[in-house]
Image (cartoon, rainbow, N blue to C red):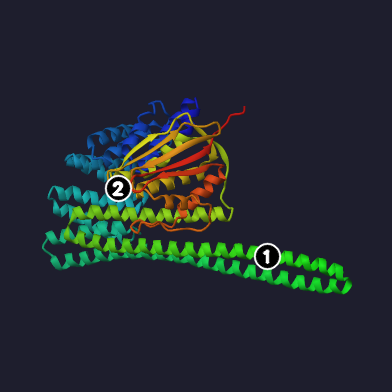
Amino acid sequence: MKELSLTKNAELKNYCYYFRGVSFKQKKLFKEAKKEFNLVPANFRHSYKVKINLGEIALEQSDFKMALHYFQEIEKLPVSTSYNIYRSSLLHNIGLCYLHLAKFDKSEEYLFKGSKLLEKEKDTLMLISSYIDIANLYYTQYKDSQAIPYFEKAYHLSKKANSFNLKKTAALNMAVVEENRKNFPLALTYRKELEAWKDSLNDQNKVWAIADLEKKFAVKQKQKEVDVLAAENKVKIAERNGFLISSVLLLILFGTGVYFYRQKIKNNKIILAQKNELDELNATKDKLFSIVSHDLRSSVNALKVSNGKLIENLENKNFTELDVLLHNNSTIANGAYNLLDNLLNWALLQTQQAYFYQESLHLATIVQHVEYNYKPLMLNKNIDFKNDVASSDYVFADLDSLKIIIRNFLDNAIKFSNEDGTISIYTRPASEDFCYLVIEDTGLGMSKATREELLKETILLSKKKNDDIIGTGLGMQLCKSMIHKNGGKLDIESEENSGTKIIIALQKFKNHG
């Protein structure tokens, strides 16, 4: 977006549209992806890739006629190194389109062409999917004798694959085949294997998550022990050196001894002040680890309980409840991810390892970029979002830290907003030195005491008052530090049950040239 607003180079603009389209497609934002791809002209050197992407989007959206139109245009291109096209994937996609359009002869022709290329390329994962699609082609036409060998091929080939999802699909297909053939003992064997693959996938994810948390916790604990020992050694060395120096100088001259004695007292005061500061930092770290551990444990436990309900409803085929549980799992995972991301950025900021470079930034573009990442969360709560940031505002700030600030406040606005609420981001009239960015929600709001507590300059973290929505306070602390580092200011306007306005004052970019 920044490059599009600045460049006049037509070819560079085409690349920008193309890469934005690919990015939207990866995020499953197909409407926005198609809009960007359609801005790329036909004379673009990679226009064939634009058509491939548009075809894949149409296939995802079940618009099979349109998908077939795009894929057939690509099929007509000559086989040449000038075109980076995966022929096997293209032929397979054309076969899928014909299958969904009930043109079975054409589907059979293209699916077999694609599978032969995949066999030569030895692409195991794609070949398994190809065999399953060929089997479904025959199964749809009640040609069981032709379908079953391909189900079996896919099943045996899945044994060599590392994908648990493909293993589950292949086992499920074989279970259905045997059930239709009334071979219930063998069908039960496949069903048990299907459950085993599900359990393996769940166990693998749980073990990885727990191991990762334990590793991070162990590293933090060890670092804490090292810091404490280092501080104790410094104090001991300082005291020993002070005593020796004082003893020697007292023997030489009483007056000089008095001088160094006073110096020793002064040094001890400095050391004591440093020790007190270190104790405060350690207390903050202890409190942070306690809160983060509690929140992560709560998130993991909530995810565990929700997954249990998910399995139960899946077995009962209660699809309405499944949708609610899946959205709940997504919310829990997103909250845990944001907590860990804030923890990482806070640690980098405390240890002065974070890269920081202030430059001219187009404020509206940055807000729009962050907004796209939170669209699904807002849609989930049916929140009405309004973006009225002035396109003329440029600020002087660090890009990464500004994104973190906006992301945290927008995340809080969503978290504390009710269903069918409203969130607005806009700019107030700027002063000579500052631009004022406002993030307003119609959520729970806060009391005057809570507002004053949040604005205090303190390194200690605090919990939010509402027991139903508990945070570490780490996000607010991180935002205050980063706003201060960018030379800005923070203010809050809020009343209980009347929503909240977060007002961020950012340095205005001044072009001295």
Q: In this orientation, which residue lies closer to the viewer: 213 or 474? A: 474
Identified at 27% across, 66% down, the residue is 196
Q: Residue 117, which numbered label? A: none
What's the distance in space between the residues labelled 1 and 2, CA to CA?
Answer: 51 Å
Is the residue marked by circle 1 packed among few (<14), some (14-19), or many (20+) residues within 10 Å? some
Identified at 15% across, 68% down, the residue is 185
Q: Whole-percent x and y of residue 113?
A: 28, 43
Q: In this orientation, which residue lies closer to the viewer: 261 or 381? A: 261
Q: Whole-percent x and y of residue 459?
A: 53, 56
- Asked whether, in this view, residue 513 is left or right of residue 378, the answer is right
- Asked whether, in this view, residue 431 is left or right of residue 94, the answer is right
Instruction: Give, as a three-letter code, the residue at label 1.
Output: Ile
Is the residue marked by circle 2 packed among few (<14), some (14-19), or many (20+) residues within 10 Å? some
Q: Is residue 361 visible?
A: no
| Residue 218, placed above or below residue 165 | below
Q: Secondary structure at mark 1?
A: helix
Q: In this orientation, which residue lies closer to the viewer: 450 or 93? A: 450
Determine which residue is flagged by label 2.
418
Instruction: Give, as a three-letter code, the residue at label 2.
Output: Asn
Q: In this orientation, which residue lies closer to the viewer: 4 or 431? A: 431
Which of the 4 image quarters holds residue 290? Answer: bottom left
Q: Residue furthest front?
A: 448
Determine which residue is flagged by label 1.
271
Quadrant in which the C terminus is drawn: top right
Identified at 20% across, 67% down, the residue is 189
Quadrant in which the N terminus is drawn: top left
Identified at 19% across, 50% down, the residue is 136
Q: Whole-percent x and y of residue 53?
A: 34, 37
Which of the 4 image quarters holds residue 171? Answer: bottom left
- Asked whether, in this view, residue 55 is left or right of residue 348, the answer is left
| Residue 416, placed above or below residue 73 | below
